[in-house]
Structure formats: structure tokens, C-alpha cells
Image (spheres, rainbow, N blue to C red):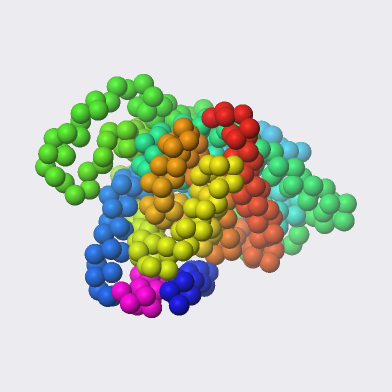
């Protein structure tokens, strides 16, 4: 009965999320439903467990959500993001339309621009290019997803996206963890994804299918619109990457910095400086990027009021993102506290393929990311519940926590893009298409991402490389 209650709760959460209901409201509702079926007292479960875990997550990652959203909004409103996307797409031309759209998405996400902003920045130029090249528009969402939602989100080392940052808090690693495997995995995803999309393009051309007649959200490109040059536009992205690298790998952080705060017995103090260096470094890097983007793009904003509007919109937008994820984390921790979860946890930990925790970790993170429809949410739940066990297992066999980091990060970007994923729904809406039109190709990207996690695990098992 207890396991049935958990499964019922999970199904209802996924169903309601798919139907568009907010997980901020319904995650606690269905968590408490599962708790009640297991005989837990509802109010303590809500205020002392659900809220406590949600607040812990907010404490750790809200600065990244806030600054990331503000940076993305400034890059969008100043036209800097569009300047980069337009240059890449225009330079490669219609002969390499799919490659150019993928590269535009990769450059922006690896530079720290949020996935949602990338969709809005790339779509107008990508749509115009697909139309000029007479490529079916239904292939466009899968192409944008490959560029924005895959390799540069969680695989390639150094990406400042939240999916690559979260594991640092649990494993004491940094965002450059397992660099060779991450790079190989990312390149594998991009290669297979482009091959698939080119195959689909050629099949459509052979069948005589072109761009198609579309009227919904068809962009109007103003050819006389003056966009910032790519040389200027890319500087804030480079600032984020360079400052982040310097603060993570070069700057000598004092390991005793936390001692005065530990002496205060603050309830949420990090156990060691290594657990928060990546977060601190990215905070400094994003602030640098924001300041530079404002300096370079202020003229395009036009006024101080416009700047205030952009900053406010980014700040407000970050609240929805962090609260969605924090609610999912609170939900996961209530589920983990239930007696029925012990058998589920034991089954996941009993996956001993290859004699290491990697397959267990990959499967667990993938499943939870798929259920929640959120890479960051699913991974946060999984790591909060089982990271200590995986770490202990890894230590017992002499395995580096770096590979645990990379597998968790890549697995989070696997089955997260199921139909109820918010980014997928937004992408299709922006493109003016439906799940029926285009989700098939997005699902192929999802499958490639999921497959590549296990390819990386196999490579590590055979060669031991990181």
C-alpha cells in the first residue's frame, strides 16, 4: 500500500504538470497525499520536512537562478544574444542551416545565457533560415533543442548552467569535473543529433516537403534593424567563462573562510569551502557578465527605465524557476522519508552493473528528471536522497567523485525533456508548433542524451579516464 501511494503520487504530479498546473502548488499536495497514505502527520510533514528541504535548496542555489535570469534578460533586451545568433546563422548560410542553428544555441548556453532566453533569441533567425533553405519547420524545435538543451547544458565541462553546478554541492567537485568524458559525451550527442536531423531533412526533401505554410508565430525579421556586432556581443559571455575559470581553478580560496560562520552554529552552513567554491565563483562570474553586458548594450536599451525593467523582469522571472525546483525538492524528500521508499531505494542501490554506483546513479537521476519534467529538480531530489550512499560506495572502490558529478549532470539532461517539460512546452509555443508536429525529433534528442550517459560510463569503466 505504501509503495502504491508513492506511485500514485508520482503519477498525479506528472499528470498535473503535463496539464499545465503549477508544481509550486501541487507538489506539496501530492507529497502530503503519499504521506497520509503512509500514516504520517500532515502538518509536520509539510512545515518541518517539505519546507525545510525547499529552503535548503533555495539557500544554496537562489543566487545562481537570480543572476542567471538577470544576465539572460540583459543579453536578450540589449540585442546582444540576437547579435550572436544572427551572425552565426547568417555566416554559415542556408547550406548548413541545421548546423548553424545548433552552434548558435551552443555558444549562447555555454556562455551562461539561460535556455529559455536562447529559444527566444535564436528562433526568429533560425525560422527565417529554414524558410530560405526550404527545410520543414517541424524540424526546427528539435534543432534548437539539440543546440540549447543538450551538450552545453550538462555535458561539456565548464558550462555555467545550473545542471552542471548542482553536483558540486554534493560531491565537493567543480564544474570542470571529468573534462575528457564530458567533452567526448557532449561531442557525441551533437554529432549523433546533427546526423539524425540531416537524415530527416534529406528524407523530407526527397519526398518534396518544404518549409510548409505556417501563420502562427511566424517572425518578421527587420532587415534594417541594427544588431550589435558579434565581436562586442560575445564579450559578456567570455567574461563569464574566463572569470568563472579563474575563480574556480586559479584563485587561492582560504579553506578557513567558513570557520567564523561555523562557530555561529548557523543551521545551513556548508561543511567545507570546497562544497561552495563553484557557487561562489559563478556568482562572481555572472555579476561580471551582467555589468559588462549593461555597459556594452546600454545604448540599445535606450533609457534607465528600460534597464530597470530588464533587471526587474529577470529578477521576478528567477522566482518562478527557483520555487518550481525547490517545491520538487521538498516533494522528493517527503517521498524519501516514507517507509515504502526504502524498497524503491534498495532496488535502485542494488543496480551494481560494472561494480560501481554509476549505473545506479544514472538510472535514478534519469527517472526522477523524467517524472518531474525538470533536469535540475530531478537531479536535486536524487542527490539529496542518495548522494551520500553513492559517494560512500565510490570511496570504497577508489572511484573519483568527478565521474559521479559528470554522470549525474548528464543523466539529468536525459529523460527530463518528456512532453510535460516546461522548456519543451515553451519551445513548441515559440515555434508555433504542436507536440504532434515536432515532439518526435525532440524525443530522439532525449534518447541520444540518455544513451550517451551510458556510453560515458562504459568508457570510464574500460579506460578509467576522467
Between residue 288 and residue 312, name the one nearer to us. Answer: 288
In this image, 82 relative to 287: left or right?
right
Between residue 287 and residue 325, name the one nearer to us. Answer: 325
- 326 to 32, vertically: above or below: above
Q: Which residues are magenta?
A: 27-40
- 52 to 109, vertically: above or below: below
Q: Quadrant of the N terminus?
A: bottom left
Where residue 314 appears, x then y in whole percent?
37, 50
In this image, 109 relative to 69: left or right?
right
Q: Quadrant of the C terminus?
A: top right
Query: For the point 37% across and 28% down, which residue is it?
Result: 248
463 is within the stretch colored magenta? no
Where residue 436 appears, x then y in whole percent?
68, 66
Query: For the point 59% across and 63% down, which residue is it?
Result: 419
Magenta residues: mostly which secondary structure?
helix
Find residue 283 and report its image quarter.
top left
Query: For the point 69% across and 38% down, which residue is it?
Result: 191
Between residue 153 and residue 123, name the one nearer to us. Answer: 153
Image label count: 0
Where residue 354 appears, x then y in whole percent?
59, 42
Query: For the point 28% across and 33% down, which residue is it?
Result: 273
- For residue 96, say whether it is visible: yes
Q: Residue furthest left?
A: 264
32 is within the stretch colored magenta? yes
- For residue 87, say whether it is visible: no
Find residue 72 and report its image quarter.
top left
Where residue 153 appears, x then y in whole percent?
52, 43
Amino acid at each position: 500500500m505504501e509503495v502504491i501511494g508513492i506511485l500514485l503520487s508520482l503519477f498525479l504530479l506528472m499528470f498535473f504538470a503535463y496539464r499545465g498546473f503549477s508544481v509550486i502548488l501541487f507538489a506539496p499536495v501530492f507529497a502530503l497525499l503519499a504521506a497520509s497514505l503512509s500514516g504520517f502527520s500532515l502538518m509536520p510533514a509539510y512545515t518541518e520536512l517539505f519546507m525545510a528541504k525547499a529552503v535548503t535548496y533555495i539557500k544554496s542555489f537562489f543566487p545562481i537562478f537570480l543572476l542567471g535570469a538577470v544576465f539572460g534578460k540583459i543579453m536578450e533586451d540589449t540585442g546582444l544574444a540576437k547579435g550572436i545568433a544572427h551572425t552565426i546563422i547568417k555566416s554559415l548560410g542556408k547550406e548548413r542551416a541545421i548546423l548553424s542553428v545548433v552552434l548558435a544555441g551552443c555558444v549562447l548556453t555555454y556562455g551562461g545565457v539561460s535556455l529559455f532566453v536562447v529559444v527566444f533569441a535564436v528562433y526568429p533567425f533560425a525560422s527565417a533560415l529554414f524558410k530560405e533553405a526550404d527545410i520543414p519547420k517541424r524540424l526546427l524545435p528539435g534543432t534548437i533543442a539539440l543546440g540549447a538543451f543538450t551538450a552545453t547544458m550538462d555535458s561539456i565541462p565548464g558550462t555555467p548552467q545550473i545542471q552542471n553546478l548542482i553536483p558540486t554541492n554534493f560531491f565537493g567537485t567543480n564544474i570542470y569535473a571529468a573534462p575528457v568524458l564530458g567533452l567526448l559525451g557532449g561531442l557525441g550527442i551533437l554529432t549523433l543529433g546533427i546526423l539524425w536531423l540531416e537524415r530527416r531533412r534529406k528524407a523530407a526533401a526527397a519526398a518534396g516537403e518544404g518549409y510548409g505554410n505556417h501563420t502562427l508565430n511566424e517572425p518578421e525579421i527587420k532587415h534594417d534593424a541594427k544588431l550589435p556586432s558579434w565581436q562586442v556581443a560575445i564579450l559578456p559571455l567570455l567574461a563569464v567563462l574566463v572569470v568563472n575559470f579563474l575563480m574556480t581553478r586559479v584563485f587561492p580560496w582560504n579553506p578557513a573562510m567558513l570557520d567564523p560562520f561555523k562557530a555561529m552554529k548557523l543551521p545551513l552552513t556548508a561543511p567545507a569551502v570546497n562544497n561552495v567554491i563553484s557557487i561562489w565563483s559563478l556568482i562572481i562570474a555572472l555579476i561580471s557578465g551582467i555589468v559588462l553586458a549593461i555597459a556594452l548594450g546600454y545604448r540599445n536599451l535606450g533609457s534607465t527605465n528600460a534597464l530597470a525593467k530588464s533587471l526587474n523582469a529577470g529578477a521576478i522571472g528567477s522566482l518562478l524557476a527557483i520555487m518550481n525546483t525547490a517545491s520538487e525538492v521538498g516533494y522528493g524528500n517527503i517521498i524519501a522519508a516514507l517507509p515504502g521508499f526504502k524498497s524503491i531505494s534498495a532496488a535502485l542501490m542494488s543496480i551494481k552493473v560494472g561494480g560501481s554506483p554509476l549505473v545506479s546513479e544514472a538510472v535514478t537521476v534519469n527517472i526522477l528528471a523524467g517524472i518531474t519534467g525538470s533536469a535540475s529538480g530531478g537531479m536535486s531530489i536524487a542527490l539529496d536522497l542518495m548522494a551520500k550512499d553513492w559517494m560512500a560506495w565510490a570511496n570504497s572502490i577508489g572511484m573519483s567523485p568527478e565521474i559521479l558529478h559528470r554522470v549525474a549532470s548528464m543523466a539529468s539532461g536525459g529523460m527530463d525533456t518528456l512532453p510535460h517539460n516546461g522548456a519543451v512546452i515553451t519551445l513548441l509555443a515559440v515555434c508555433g508548433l504542436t507536440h504532434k508536429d515536432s515532439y518526435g525529433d525532440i524525443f530522439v534528442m532525449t534518447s541520444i542524451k540518455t544513451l550517451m550517459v551510458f556510453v560515458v560510463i562504459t568508457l570510464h569503466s574500460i579506460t578509467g579516464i576522467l
